[in-house]
Image (cartoon, grey):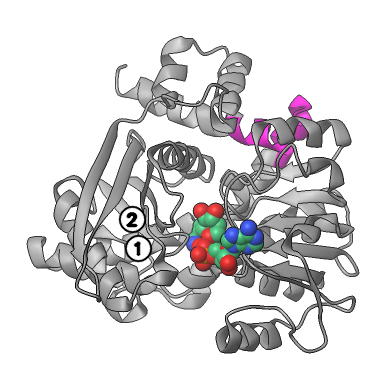
Amino acid sequence: MSNTHATPTSYEISVGAACKRLGYGPTIESLLSLAALELKVEIPIVRDNGELAIFTGYRVQHQNVRGPCKGGLRYHPDVDIQEVRELAALMTMKTALVNIPLGGGKGGIACNPHEMSQRELEVLTRKFVKRIHREIGPNSDIMAPDVGTNAQTMGWIHSEYSAIYGHSPAAVTGKPLALGGSPGRNTATGHGIAIVVAEYARHHRMPLKGSTAVVQGFGNVGFHAAQALAALGIKVVAISDSRSAVYRDGGIDLAALSDQKHARGSLKDTEGHDSLEPDALFEIPCDFLVPAALGDAIHAGNVARLACRIIVEGANAPVTAEADLTLRERGIAVIPDILANAGGVIVSYFEWVQNLQRQVWALETVDAELERLLGNATREVLAHAAGADLDLRSAAFDIAVRRVKEALEATGL
Ligand code: NAD
Protein backbone atom coordinates (compact mmCIF):
# COMPACT_ATOMS: atom_id res chain seq x y z
CA MET A 1 0.00 0.00 0.00
CA SER A 2 1.42 3.41 -0.79
CA ASN A 3 2.16 4.91 2.55
CA THR A 4 2.44 8.61 3.24
CA HIS A 5 4.16 7.97 6.60
CA ALA A 6 7.96 7.86 6.66
CA THR A 7 8.04 4.60 8.65
CA PRO A 8 6.54 1.40 7.24
CA THR A 9 3.23 0.28 8.72
CA SER A 10 2.86 -2.93 10.66
CA TYR A 11 1.04 -4.40 7.63
CA GLU A 12 3.88 -3.50 5.25
CA ILE A 13 6.46 -5.01 7.60
CA SER A 14 4.45 -8.22 8.00
CA VAL A 15 3.80 -8.65 4.26
CA GLY A 16 7.41 -7.82 3.36
CA ALA A 17 8.77 -10.32 5.87
CA ALA A 18 6.33 -13.04 4.72
CA CYS A 19 7.31 -12.51 1.04
CA LYS A 20 10.97 -12.83 2.03
CA ARG A 21 10.40 -16.05 4.01
CA LEU A 22 8.32 -17.52 1.18
CA GLY A 23 10.80 -16.49 -1.50
CA TYR A 24 8.32 -14.25 -3.39
CA GLY A 25 9.69 -11.40 -5.50
CA PRO A 26 8.95 -7.68 -5.46
CA THR A 27 5.98 -7.98 -7.87
CA ILE A 28 3.92 -9.97 -5.40
CA GLU A 29 4.96 -7.70 -2.54
CA SER A 30 3.89 -4.63 -4.56
CA LEU A 31 0.58 -6.22 -5.52
CA LEU A 32 -0.12 -6.95 -1.87
CA SER A 33 0.92 -3.45 -0.85
CA LEU A 34 -1.10 -1.40 -3.33
CA ALA A 35 -4.86 -0.95 -3.28
CA ALA A 36 -6.72 -1.75 -6.50
CA LEU A 37 -9.15 1.18 -6.16
CA GLU A 38 -9.44 4.17 -3.83
CA LEU A 39 -12.52 6.38 -3.71
CA LYS A 40 -12.76 9.72 -1.92
CA VAL A 41 -16.07 11.56 -1.94
CA GLU A 42 -17.33 14.79 -0.42
CA ILE A 43 -20.79 14.49 1.11
CA PRO A 44 -22.74 17.66 1.88
CA ILE A 45 -25.70 17.39 4.25
CA VAL A 46 -28.00 19.91 5.90
CA ARG A 47 -27.59 19.58 9.67
CA ASP A 48 -30.58 19.72 12.00
CA ASN A 49 -29.72 23.35 12.80
CA GLY A 50 -30.14 24.25 9.12
CA GLU A 51 -26.41 24.67 8.43
CA LEU A 52 -24.63 22.90 5.59
CA ALA A 53 -21.81 20.52 6.60
CA ILE A 54 -19.49 18.63 4.26
CA PHE A 55 -18.07 15.24 5.28
CA THR A 56 -15.34 13.28 3.52
CA GLY A 57 -15.95 9.59 2.85
CA TYR A 58 -13.58 6.88 1.62
CA ARG A 59 -13.86 3.39 0.23
CA VAL A 60 -10.72 1.40 -0.58
CA GLN A 61 -10.80 -1.89 -2.48
CA HIS A 62 -7.50 -3.60 -1.83
CA GLN A 63 -7.71 -7.02 -3.53
CA ASN A 64 -10.48 -9.05 -5.14
CA VAL A 65 -8.58 -11.97 -6.63
CA ARG A 66 -10.10 -14.48 -4.15
CA GLY A 67 -13.59 -12.92 -4.20
CA PRO A 68 -15.44 -9.59 -3.89
CA CYS A 69 -13.87 -7.01 -1.59
CA LYS A 70 -15.22 -7.25 1.93
CA GLY A 71 -14.81 -4.96 4.91
CA GLY A 72 -16.36 -2.58 7.38
CA LEU A 73 -17.46 1.02 7.21
CA ARG A 74 -16.13 3.24 10.02
CA TYR A 75 -17.60 6.53 11.30
CA HIS A 76 -15.00 8.33 13.39
CA PRO A 77 -13.44 11.83 13.40
CA ASP A 78 -9.91 10.41 12.78
CA VAL A 79 -10.81 8.46 9.62
CA ASP A 80 -8.39 9.27 6.77
CA ILE A 81 -7.18 7.59 3.59
CA GLN A 82 -4.08 6.10 5.19
CA GLU A 83 -6.09 4.38 7.93
CA VAL A 84 -8.69 3.06 5.48
CA ARG A 85 -5.93 1.77 3.18
CA GLU A 86 -4.24 -0.19 5.92
CA LEU A 87 -7.51 -1.61 7.19
CA ALA A 88 -8.53 -2.66 3.65
CA ALA A 89 -5.24 -4.49 3.17
CA LEU A 90 -5.66 -6.27 6.50
CA MET A 91 -9.05 -7.52 5.27
CA THR A 92 -7.39 -9.18 2.26
CA MET A 93 -5.13 -11.05 4.67
CA LYS A 94 -7.98 -11.89 7.05
CA THR A 95 -10.28 -13.39 4.42
CA ALA A 96 -7.35 -15.36 2.97
CA LEU A 97 -6.24 -16.62 6.39
CA VAL A 98 -9.66 -18.00 7.29
CA ASN A 99 -10.00 -19.20 3.70
CA ILE A 100 -13.32 -17.68 2.68
CA PRO A 101 -13.89 -16.64 -0.97
CA LEU A 102 -13.71 -12.90 -0.41
CA GLY A 103 -11.13 -10.14 -0.81
CA GLY A 104 -10.34 -7.04 1.21
CA GLY A 105 -11.92 -3.60 1.39
CA LYS A 106 -12.67 -0.90 3.94
CA GLY A 107 -14.50 2.40 4.13
CA GLY A 108 -15.00 5.30 6.44
CA ILE A 109 -16.46 8.74 6.86
CA ALA A 110 -14.66 11.35 8.95
CA CYS A 111 -17.47 12.34 11.32
CA ASN A 112 -18.42 12.05 14.97
CA PRO A 113 -21.56 9.89 15.07
CA HIS A 114 -22.01 10.63 18.79
CA GLU A 115 -22.63 14.28 17.96
CA MET A 116 -25.07 13.60 15.11
CA SER A 117 -28.79 12.85 15.15
CA GLN A 118 -30.22 9.68 13.64
CA ARG A 119 -31.67 11.77 10.82
CA GLU A 120 -28.27 13.30 10.03
CA LEU A 121 -26.59 9.88 10.10
CA GLU A 122 -29.24 8.42 7.81
CA VAL A 123 -28.91 11.26 5.27
CA LEU A 124 -25.09 10.99 5.40
CA THR A 125 -25.17 7.21 4.87
CA ARG A 126 -27.68 7.33 2.02
CA LYS A 127 -25.74 10.10 0.25
CA PHE A 128 -22.52 8.12 0.62
CA VAL A 129 -24.20 5.17 -1.11
CA LYS A 130 -25.51 7.48 -3.86
CA ARG A 131 -21.92 8.63 -4.47
CA ILE A 132 -20.26 5.19 -4.60
CA HIS A 133 -23.02 2.74 -5.65
CA ARG A 134 -21.43 1.97 -9.03
CA GLU A 135 -18.38 0.49 -7.32
CA ILE A 136 -20.10 -1.60 -4.60
CA GLY A 137 -22.44 -4.57 -4.65
CA PRO A 138 -22.75 -8.33 -4.03
CA ASN A 139 -20.12 -9.22 -6.66
CA SER A 140 -17.72 -6.31 -6.16
CA ASP A 141 -17.57 -4.83 -2.68
CA ILE A 142 -19.67 -5.63 0.38
CA MET A 143 -19.69 -3.33 3.42
CA ALA A 144 -20.32 -4.26 7.08
CA PRO A 145 -20.38 -2.50 10.48
CA ASP A 146 -17.23 -1.21 12.14
CA VAL A 147 -16.43 1.50 14.70
CA GLY A 148 -19.29 3.99 14.93
CA THR A 149 -21.65 2.07 12.61
CA ASN A 150 -24.14 -0.70 13.36
CA ALA A 151 -26.96 -2.82 11.97
CA GLN A 152 -29.11 0.30 11.47
CA THR A 153 -26.41 1.89 9.28
CA MET A 154 -26.29 -1.29 7.19
CA GLY A 155 -30.11 -1.20 6.93
CA TRP A 156 -29.89 2.29 5.36
CA ILE A 157 -27.21 1.10 2.93
CA HIS A 158 -29.36 -1.89 1.98
CA SER A 159 -32.38 0.32 1.43
CA GLU A 160 -30.52 2.92 -0.66
CA TYR A 161 -28.67 0.34 -2.76
CA SER A 162 -31.87 -1.67 -3.33
CA ALA A 163 -33.71 1.50 -4.43
CA ILE A 164 -31.21 1.75 -7.31
CA TYR A 165 -30.64 -1.93 -8.22
CA GLY A 166 -33.73 -3.75 -6.90
CA HIS A 167 -33.82 -5.88 -3.75
CA SER A 168 -30.15 -6.73 -3.10
CA PRO A 169 -29.62 -7.99 0.45
CA ALA A 170 -26.23 -9.54 -0.42
CA ALA A 171 -24.83 -6.05 -1.14
CA VAL A 172 -24.17 -5.40 2.55
CA THR A 173 -23.81 -7.55 5.70
CA GLY A 174 -24.43 -6.93 9.38
CA LYS A 175 -27.98 -5.88 8.47
CA PRO A 176 -30.90 -6.06 10.91
CA LEU A 177 -32.42 -9.58 11.01
CA ALA A 178 -35.65 -8.12 9.56
CA LEU A 179 -33.77 -7.21 6.35
CA GLY A 180 -31.94 -10.51 5.85
CA GLY A 181 -29.23 -10.17 8.48
CA SER A 182 -27.75 -13.38 9.82
CA PRO A 183 -28.43 -14.73 13.26
CA GLY A 184 -25.18 -14.55 15.22
CA ARG A 185 -23.61 -11.69 13.20
CA ASN A 186 -23.90 -9.10 15.98
CA THR A 187 -22.00 -11.25 18.48
CA ALA A 188 -19.69 -12.97 15.96
CA THR A 189 -16.49 -10.96 16.38
CA GLY A 190 -16.56 -11.18 20.18
CA HIS A 191 -17.49 -14.86 20.18
CA GLY A 192 -14.78 -15.53 17.60
CA ILE A 193 -12.22 -14.07 20.01
CA ALA A 194 -13.24 -16.66 22.59
CA ILE A 195 -13.01 -19.49 20.02
CA VAL A 196 -9.43 -18.45 19.18
CA VAL A 197 -8.47 -18.06 22.86
CA ALA A 198 -9.88 -21.51 23.69
CA GLU A 199 -7.91 -23.08 20.83
CA TYR A 200 -4.73 -21.25 21.88
CA ALA A 201 -5.14 -22.46 25.47
CA ARG A 202 -5.76 -26.05 24.32
CA HIS A 203 -2.60 -25.95 22.19
CA HIS A 204 -0.52 -24.64 25.10
CA ARG A 205 -2.26 -26.86 27.69
CA MET A 206 -3.17 -23.73 29.58
CA PRO A 207 -6.12 -24.02 31.97
CA LEU A 208 -8.65 -21.26 31.34
CA LYS A 209 -10.59 -21.62 34.58
CA GLY A 210 -9.06 -19.11 36.98
CA SER A 211 -7.20 -17.20 34.28
CA THR A 212 -7.87 -13.46 33.95
CA ALA A 213 -8.60 -11.00 31.15
CA VAL A 214 -8.72 -7.23 30.69
CA VAL A 215 -10.70 -5.74 27.78
CA GLN A 216 -10.27 -2.29 26.23
CA GLY A 217 -13.46 -1.06 24.54
CA PHE A 218 -17.13 -1.48 25.42
CA GLY A 219 -18.53 -1.50 21.89
CA ASN A 220 -19.65 -4.42 19.76
CA VAL A 221 -16.36 -6.30 19.94
CA GLY A 222 -15.32 -5.48 23.51
CA PHE A 223 -18.69 -6.22 25.07
CA HIS A 224 -19.28 -9.54 23.30
CA ALA A 225 -15.67 -10.63 23.76
CA ALA A 226 -15.94 -10.01 27.52
CA GLN A 227 -19.18 -11.97 27.61
CA ALA A 228 -17.76 -14.91 25.65
CA LEU A 229 -14.47 -15.02 27.58
CA ALA A 230 -16.42 -15.08 30.86
CA ALA A 231 -18.45 -18.00 29.46
CA LEU A 232 -15.16 -19.92 29.07
CA GLY A 233 -14.51 -19.49 32.80
CA ILE A 234 -12.04 -16.63 32.36
CA LYS A 235 -12.37 -13.91 34.99
CA VAL A 236 -12.68 -10.56 33.17
CA VAL A 237 -11.44 -8.15 35.84
CA ALA A 238 -11.46 -4.80 33.98
CA ILE A 239 -12.99 -3.10 30.95
CA SER A 240 -12.98 0.44 29.53
CA ASP A 241 -14.65 2.79 27.09
CA SER A 242 -13.16 5.97 25.63
CA ARG A 243 -13.66 7.99 28.80
CA SER A 244 -13.65 5.56 31.72
CA ALA A 245 -12.41 2.22 32.99
CA VAL A 246 -13.63 -0.06 35.76
CA TYR A 247 -12.06 -2.87 37.78
CA ARG A 248 -13.55 -5.60 39.95
CA ASP A 249 -11.36 -8.22 41.53
CA GLY A 250 -14.00 -10.94 41.44
CA GLY A 251 -14.89 -10.28 37.80
CA ILE A 252 -16.87 -7.41 36.28
CA ASP A 253 -20.68 -7.47 36.17
CA LEU A 254 -21.40 -6.90 32.46
CA ALA A 255 -25.15 -6.47 32.91
CA ALA A 256 -24.66 -3.76 35.56
CA LEU A 257 -22.05 -2.02 33.39
CA SER A 258 -24.32 -2.13 30.36
CA ASP A 259 -27.18 -0.58 32.37
CA GLN A 260 -24.86 2.16 33.67
CA LYS A 261 -23.54 2.88 30.16
CA HIS A 262 -27.07 3.20 28.77
CA ALA A 263 -28.30 5.33 31.66
CA ARG A 264 -25.26 7.58 32.17
CA GLY A 265 -23.24 7.25 28.95
CA SER A 266 -20.17 6.11 30.89
CA LEU A 267 -18.96 3.09 32.89
CA LYS A 268 -17.70 5.35 35.68
CA ASP A 269 -19.02 4.84 39.23
CA THR A 270 -20.86 1.60 38.47
CA GLU A 271 -21.80 0.12 41.83
CA GLY A 272 -19.41 -2.56 43.11
CA HIS A 273 -16.64 -1.56 40.68
CA ASP A 274 -13.53 0.60 41.17
CA SER A 275 -13.23 3.43 38.64
CA LEU A 276 -9.81 3.86 37.01
CA GLU A 277 -8.25 6.23 34.54
CA PRO A 278 -8.56 4.53 31.09
CA ASP A 279 -4.75 4.67 30.72
CA ALA A 280 -4.29 2.52 33.85
CA LEU A 281 -6.10 -0.39 32.21
CA PHE A 282 -3.05 -1.81 30.46
CA GLU A 283 -1.05 -1.95 33.70
CA ILE A 284 -3.40 -4.42 35.35
CA PRO A 285 -1.73 -7.85 35.65
CA CYS A 286 -3.69 -10.43 33.65
CA ASP A 287 -3.29 -13.43 31.36
CA PHE A 288 -5.18 -12.04 28.34
CA LEU A 289 -5.27 -8.37 27.35
CA VAL A 290 -7.86 -7.72 24.63
CA PRO A 291 -7.53 -4.32 22.95
CA ALA A 292 -10.96 -4.00 21.27
CA ALA A 293 -11.24 -0.27 20.54
CA LEU A 294 -9.12 1.63 18.03
CA GLY A 295 -5.80 1.16 16.22
CA ASP A 296 -2.37 1.97 17.75
CA ALA A 297 -3.64 1.52 21.31
CA ILE A 298 -0.41 -0.25 22.31
CA HIS A 299 2.57 1.88 21.33
CA ALA A 300 6.14 2.74 22.27
CA GLY A 301 4.89 4.94 25.10
CA ASN A 302 2.96 2.28 27.01
CA VAL A 303 4.32 -1.10 25.89
CA ALA A 304 6.87 -1.28 28.70
CA ARG A 305 4.10 -0.98 31.29
CA LEU A 306 1.94 -3.86 30.02
CA ALA A 307 1.44 -6.54 32.64
CA CYS A 308 -0.26 -9.27 30.56
CA ARG A 309 1.01 -12.62 29.23
CA ILE A 310 -0.90 -12.68 25.94
CA ILE A 311 -2.41 -9.94 23.78
CA VAL A 312 -5.49 -10.88 21.79
CA GLU A 313 -6.04 -8.29 19.06
CA GLY A 314 -9.80 -7.72 19.08
CA ALA A 315 -9.36 -4.38 17.31
CA ASN A 316 -7.69 -4.01 13.93
CA ALA A 317 -4.03 -2.95 14.13
CA PRO A 318 -4.09 -2.13 17.88
CA VAL A 319 -0.30 -2.65 18.22
CA THR A 320 2.16 -0.34 16.45
CA ALA A 321 5.08 -1.86 14.54
CA GLU A 322 7.53 -0.52 17.14
CA ALA A 323 5.55 -1.92 20.07
CA ASP A 324 5.28 -5.27 18.29
CA LEU A 325 9.07 -5.63 18.40
CA THR A 326 9.17 -4.78 22.10
CA LEU A 327 6.45 -7.35 22.81
CA ARG A 328 8.56 -10.02 21.12
CA GLU A 329 11.58 -9.02 23.20
CA ARG A 330 9.44 -9.11 26.35
CA GLY A 331 8.08 -12.55 25.50
CA ILE A 332 4.45 -11.39 25.41
CA ALA A 333 2.59 -13.48 22.81
CA VAL A 334 0.28 -11.67 20.36
CA ILE A 335 -2.69 -13.38 18.73
CA PRO A 336 -2.96 -11.19 15.62
CA ASP A 337 -6.03 -9.25 14.48
CA ILE A 338 -6.36 -11.12 11.18
CA LEU A 339 -7.05 -14.26 13.23
CA ALA A 340 -8.44 -13.01 16.55
CA ASN A 341 -11.22 -10.79 15.17
CA ALA A 342 -12.02 -12.79 12.02
CA GLY A 343 -15.29 -14.10 13.48
CA GLY A 344 -17.08 -11.00 12.20
CA VAL A 345 -16.09 -11.41 8.58
CA ILE A 346 -16.75 -15.15 8.73
CA VAL A 347 -20.38 -14.63 9.79
CA SER A 348 -20.65 -11.76 7.29
CA TYR A 349 -19.65 -14.35 4.69
CA PHE A 350 -22.43 -16.64 5.98
CA GLU A 351 -24.88 -13.74 5.70
CA TRP A 352 -23.82 -13.07 2.10
CA VAL A 353 -24.19 -16.78 1.24
CA GLN A 354 -27.66 -16.94 2.84
CA ASN A 355 -28.78 -13.80 0.97
CA LEU A 356 -27.46 -15.05 -2.39
CA GLN A 357 -29.19 -18.40 -1.90
CA ARG A 358 -32.37 -16.91 -0.35
CA GLN A 359 -31.84 -19.09 2.69
CA VAL A 360 -32.05 -18.51 6.42
CA TRP A 361 -29.71 -20.53 8.63
CA ALA A 362 -30.45 -21.42 12.24
CA LEU A 363 -28.23 -19.81 14.88
CA GLU A 364 -26.87 -23.28 15.75
CA THR A 365 -25.69 -23.71 12.14
CA VAL A 366 -24.00 -20.30 12.16
CA ASP A 367 -22.28 -21.01 15.50
CA ALA A 368 -21.11 -24.48 14.44
CA GLU A 369 -19.73 -23.22 11.10
CA LEU A 370 -18.02 -20.25 12.79
CA GLU A 371 -16.38 -22.61 15.27
CA ARG A 372 -15.29 -24.92 12.43
CA LEU A 373 -13.75 -22.24 10.16
CA LEU A 374 -12.12 -20.21 12.91
CA GLY A 375 -10.97 -23.32 14.80
CA ASN A 376 -9.32 -24.65 11.62
CA ALA A 377 -7.58 -21.33 10.93
CA THR A 378 -6.32 -21.07 14.52
CA ARG A 379 -4.94 -24.62 14.52
CA GLU A 380 -3.25 -23.96 11.19
CA VAL A 381 -1.57 -20.79 12.51
CA LEU A 382 -0.49 -22.49 15.75
CA ALA A 383 0.94 -25.49 13.87
CA HIS A 384 2.83 -23.32 11.36
CA ALA A 385 4.19 -21.08 14.14
CA ALA A 386 5.41 -24.13 16.07
CA GLY A 387 6.84 -25.88 13.00
CA ALA A 388 8.67 -22.84 11.61
CA ASP A 389 9.54 -21.27 14.98
CA LEU A 390 7.62 -18.09 14.21
CA ASP A 391 5.51 -15.69 16.24
CA LEU A 392 1.78 -15.96 15.53
CA ARG A 393 1.53 -12.80 13.40
CA SER A 394 4.32 -13.99 11.09
CA ALA A 395 2.76 -17.46 10.86
CA ALA A 396 -0.66 -16.00 10.03
CA PHE A 397 0.78 -13.70 7.34
CA ASP A 398 2.71 -16.60 5.77
CA ILE A 399 -0.52 -18.56 5.32
CA ALA A 400 -2.53 -15.57 4.06
CA VAL A 401 0.15 -14.25 1.69
CA ARG A 402 0.64 -17.73 0.20
CA ARG A 403 -3.11 -18.07 -0.49
CA VAL A 404 -3.39 -14.68 -2.20
CA LYS A 405 -0.22 -15.32 -4.23
CA GLU A 406 -1.55 -18.71 -5.38
CA ALA A 407 -4.80 -17.07 -6.50
CA LEU A 408 -2.94 -14.31 -8.37
CA GLU A 409 -0.81 -16.95 -10.06
CA ALA A 410 -3.84 -19.01 -11.01
CA THR A 411 -5.19 -16.04 -12.97
CA GLY A 412 -2.13 -16.38 -15.19
CA LEU A 413 -0.25 -13.48 -13.68
P1 NAD B 1 -17.74 0.18 18.37
O1 NAD B 1 -17.92 1.52 17.80
O2 NAD B 1 -18.92 -0.69 18.58
O3 NAD B 1 -16.97 0.28 19.77
C1 NAD B 1 -15.76 0.92 19.95
C2 NAD B 1 -15.54 1.06 21.45
O4 NAD B 1 -14.22 1.55 21.70
C3 NAD B 1 -16.48 2.04 22.14
O5 NAD B 1 -16.92 1.46 23.35
C4 NAD B 1 -15.60 3.24 22.46
O6 NAD B 1 -16.03 3.93 23.62
C5 NAD B 1 -14.30 2.51 22.74
N1 NAD B 1 -13.11 3.35 22.69
C6 NAD B 1 -12.75 4.28 21.77
N2 NAD B 1 -11.58 4.82 22.12
C7 NAD B 1 -11.18 4.21 23.26
C8 NAD B 1 -10.06 4.32 24.13
N3 NAD B 1 -9.09 5.17 23.87
N4 NAD B 1 -10.01 3.53 25.22
C9 NAD B 1 -10.99 2.66 25.49
N5 NAD B 1 -12.06 2.48 24.70
C10 NAD B 1 -12.16 3.27 23.63
O7 NAD B 1 -16.66 -0.55 17.44
P2 NAD B 1 -16.44 -2.12 17.28
O8 NAD B 1 -17.25 -2.59 16.15
O9 NAD B 1 -16.55 -2.79 18.61
O10 NAD B 1 -14.92 -2.15 16.77
C11 NAD B 1 -13.82 -2.14 17.67
C12 NAD B 1 -12.58 -2.61 16.95
O11 NAD B 1 -12.78 -3.93 16.45
C13 NAD B 1 -12.17 -1.78 15.73
O12 NAD B 1 -10.77 -1.78 15.61
C14 NAD B 1 -12.77 -2.55 14.58
O13 NAD B 1 -12.10 -2.30 13.34
C15 NAD B 1 -12.55 -3.96 15.05
N6 NAD B 1 -13.41 -4.98 14.43
C16 NAD B 1 -14.77 -4.86 14.49
C17 NAD B 1 -15.55 -5.86 13.93
C18 NAD B 1 -17.06 -5.86 14.02
O14 NAD B 1 -17.67 -6.85 13.63
N7 NAD B 1 -17.70 -4.82 14.54
C19 NAD B 1 -14.95 -6.96 13.29
C20 NAD B 1 -13.56 -7.05 13.27
C21 NAD B 1 -12.82 -6.04 13.85
Magenta: main secondary structure equals helix
Res. 109 mark: none
Above or below residue 240? Residue 390 is: above
Give the residues in magenta. 382-397
Q: Toward which corner of the image does residue 162 lie, by quadrant?
A: bottom left
Tell me: is circle 2 under 8 Å from ligand 1.
no
In which quadrant will I find the C terminus?
top left
Q: Residues within 10 Å of mark 2 (few under 14, many from 20)?
A: many
Name the residue: 46% across, 11% down. 26
Q: Is residue 367 left or right of residue 299?
A: left
Q: Toward which corner of the image does residue 84 lie, by quadrant?
A: top left
Out of 237 and 211, give the one closest to the viewer. 237
Q: Is residue 236 left or right of residue 299?
A: right
Verify whether residue 386 appears in magenta: yes
Q: Secondary structure at mark 2?
A: strand
Name the residue: 83% across, 48% down. 306
Total marks in image? 2
Above or below residue 189? Residue 313 is: above
Residue labelled with disc 2? 143
Q: Disc 2 and disc 1: Cα gap in Å?
A: 6 Å
Q: Dots 2 and 1: beta carbons under 8 Å?
A: yes
Task: Give the quadrant of ligand 1.
Answer: bottom right
Verify whether residue 55 appears in magenta: no
- The three-letter amino acid code for the residue at tag 1 is Thr
Q: Is residue 369 visible?
A: no
Q: Position of residue 141 (x, y in %)?
A: 28, 48
Res. 173 mark: 1
